[in-house]
Image (tube, rainbow, N blue to C red):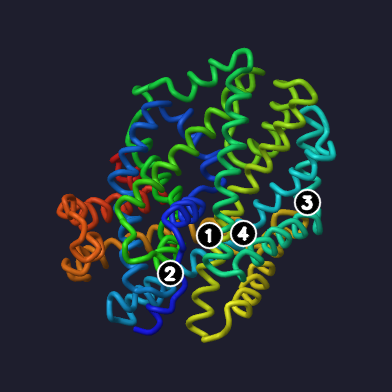
Amino acid sequence: MMEKTTRASFGSKLGIILATAGSAVGLGNIWRFPYMTGSNGGAAFIFIYVACVLVLGIPCMVSEFVIGRRGAANAARAYGRVGKSKMWKLVGFLGVLAGFLIAGYYSVVSGWCLEYVYGSAFNKIGEGTDAIHGYFQSFVQDPIRPVFWAVLFLLISHFVIIRGVRNGIEKASKVLMPTLFILLLVIVVSACLLPGAGKGIAFLFKPEFDKVDGNVFLGALGQSFYSLSLAMGAICTYASYFSRDTHLTKSAVQISVIDCLVAILAGLMIFPAAFSVGVNPDSGPSLLFVTLPNVFQQAFSPLIGYVVSLMFYALLSLAALTSIISLHEVSTAYLEEEMNISRKKAAMIITACFAVIATFCSLSLGKFEGLSLFGLPLFDLFDFFTAQILLPIGGFLTCIFLGWFVPKQTVRDELTNGGTLRGTFFAVYLFLIRFVCPLCILAVFLHQFGVFHWVGFL
């Protein structure tokens, strides 16, 4: 009981929303959502995605909130306390492990963003598609520069984490998230005012229902799950710092709205600029680090293009940083509590481990092709193992855990803050978390391995 009363906590409701939204908002919002929207029916995909957030994302987020606040501990210990079993603690540990591995390789791409902030600031990227592509390839192949930026990125998150929840995570979120929104809005306005920008807006928002099929539905389900940072331990860990009067359902809705808004604004930032110069943007790293620098150079005057490019990569860096901070906290909180060591020592160990993982993942994409397992570079292997294995399994087991093994009264008490709030939608939530969410997650999991295609369902 003493741990619960002395445990660190967020100091304000705004801090809760901004910090947790920062955990959810990341690089996937900036490039993956706009691309999926444009290639899967435009506005039709957005409608389906929003429905998936309502049906899958918010209930799963609320579930992690319940476990985190009720358990008042790191993700693994919280599951064990709520479930009163070491077996369920292992489910929580899956989230900790997923967050740990994701932070290791995610910091590599985050470091790329810092490289492009530097490259944009000092006009190092070059002009024209060939020069820009050459800059990216030489950078990724370099054994030193990507590692340097990744480690620098981790050190920034480290200094936020060692300052604690209120003085570190909350204060940083109150600066980073508003700055992110300001940069995003400025670039959106600049892009939408370009000649021919209307074609990009139409590409994003024109509903094309003829493109909608089972794959689009499953894609929207998967995007809603991954975009909200579910099953990574971050949501559960942050919830352990919530006060008892935090409205869990309302907070989940607000965070989901922010996450969706950032994703849609990212589309309004990317596609109008791309279509104004007749470029059809593609997905993946090439969009962020090859296509868009060329777009900014062609769409804007030299001075404005310089400013927009610099702001864009600063925006990417901020989005990546808020996510890395939350993932760093997952592992730090776990090590601090399970090993009974100081926060600074735990953070130092975790930062060092992340740096080692980032180094090997970065080198595996360059000249050290021998750094691979099962035919995949370490970077791709970590991405595959976390995104396609750990996250779906963790999310599925969380739904089963809260829906079938945690007493209903316990869940109701958390959602109503001990009966002080109305539990109007409790029955709907319980139905979703017991039946709908597990089936949706299972469908996404199986679809990734081509099961539905094999049996002819889709």
Q: Are marks 3 and 1 in contact (CB under 8 Å)?
A: no
Circle 4 sits in a helix, a strand or a loop, which is it? helix
Q: Considering only order in the chain, which callout, 2 or 3, is on the residue closer to the N terminus?
A: 2
Using the rendered view, name the quadrant where residue 235 is placed. bottom left
Quadrant where the C terminus is found in the figure? top left
Of the residues shown, which amino acid type is indicated by label 1?
Glu
The residue singled out by tag 2 in the image is 94
Crowdedness of circle 2 by 10 Å Cα count: few (<14), some, many (20+)? Answer: many
Which one is in front in this view, the residue at disc 2 or the one at disc 1?
1
Q: Considering only order in the chain, which callout, 1 or 2, is on the residue closer to the N terminus?
A: 2
326 vs 447: above or below: below
Of the residues shown, which amino acid type is indicated by label 2?
Leu
156 horizontally vs 98: left or right: right
The residue singled out by tag 4 in the image is 105
Which one is in front in this view, the residue at disc 4 or the one at disc 3?
4
Residue at 44 percent of width and 57 percent of height: 16
Which one is in front in this view, the residue at disc 4 or the one at disc 1?
1
Q: Position of residue 391 (x, y in %)?
A: 42, 59
Alpha-carbon span between mark 2 and mark 4: 17 Å
**Residue closest to the eye, 159 or 127:** 159
